[in-house]
């Protein structure tokens, strides 16, 4: 099972990807601008659709969501850094 764990506090952002309980990736980002992120959520990635560059995540209690790669702060910031 894959799990995406996201933590955002103030301007600092962290996310980790675990697969079968083992850490696969960990990223951290210190923001230089005011963030619009206000909450931390725990969700399990149910399906990754590479053609859409997105994932379907489950927040529990029958709450599911579509998470675009562009909506993940670390992906958006990495993309911006490569363009400068």
Image (cartoon, rainbow, N blue to C red):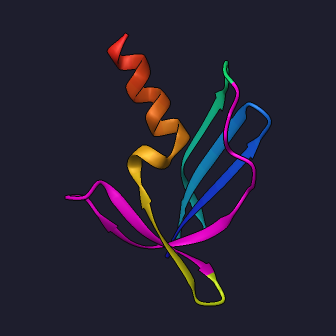
User: Foreground: 33 or 30?
Assistant: 33
Q: Quadrant of residue 50?
A: bottom left
Which residue is the extreme one toward the left? 51
- Residue 55 lies in the magenta-colored region: yes
Magenta span? 34-59
Which residue is the extreme one toward the bottom? 62
- Look at the picture and state if 12 lies above or below 38: above
Q: Position of residue 22 (x, y in %)?
A: 58, 62
Looking at the image, residue 65 sits to the left or right of residue 5; the answer is left
Which residue is the extreme one toward the right? 10
> Residue at horizontal 52%, vertical 37%?
74
Q: Where is residue 8 in the image (x, y as percent from the top left)?
A: 72, 44
Q: Quadrant of residue 28?
A: top right
User: Foreground: 63 or 36?
Assistant: 36
Looking at the image, residue 72 sits to the left or right of residue 62; the answer is left
Q: Position of residue 35 (x, y in %)?
A: 68, 34
Looking at the image, residue 9 sits to the left or right of residue 16; the answer is right
> Residue at horizontal 48%, vertical 48%?
71
Q: The C terminus appears in which quarter of the rendering?
A: top left
- Look at the picture and state if 78 lies above or below 56: above
Looking at the image, residue 61 sits to the left or right of residue 9; the answer is left
- Look at the picture and state if 36 lies above or below 33: below
């Amino acid at each position: 099972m894959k799990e995406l764990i996201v933590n955002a506090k103030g301007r600092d952002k962290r996310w980790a990807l675990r697969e079968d309980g083992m850490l696969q990736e960990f990223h951290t980002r210190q923001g230089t601008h005011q963030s619009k992120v206000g909450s931390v959520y725990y969700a399990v990635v149910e399906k990754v659709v590479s053609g859409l560059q997105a994932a379907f995540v489950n927040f529990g209690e029958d709450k599911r969501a579509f998470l675009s790669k562009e909506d993940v702060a670390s992906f958006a910031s990495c993309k911006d850094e490569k363009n400068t």
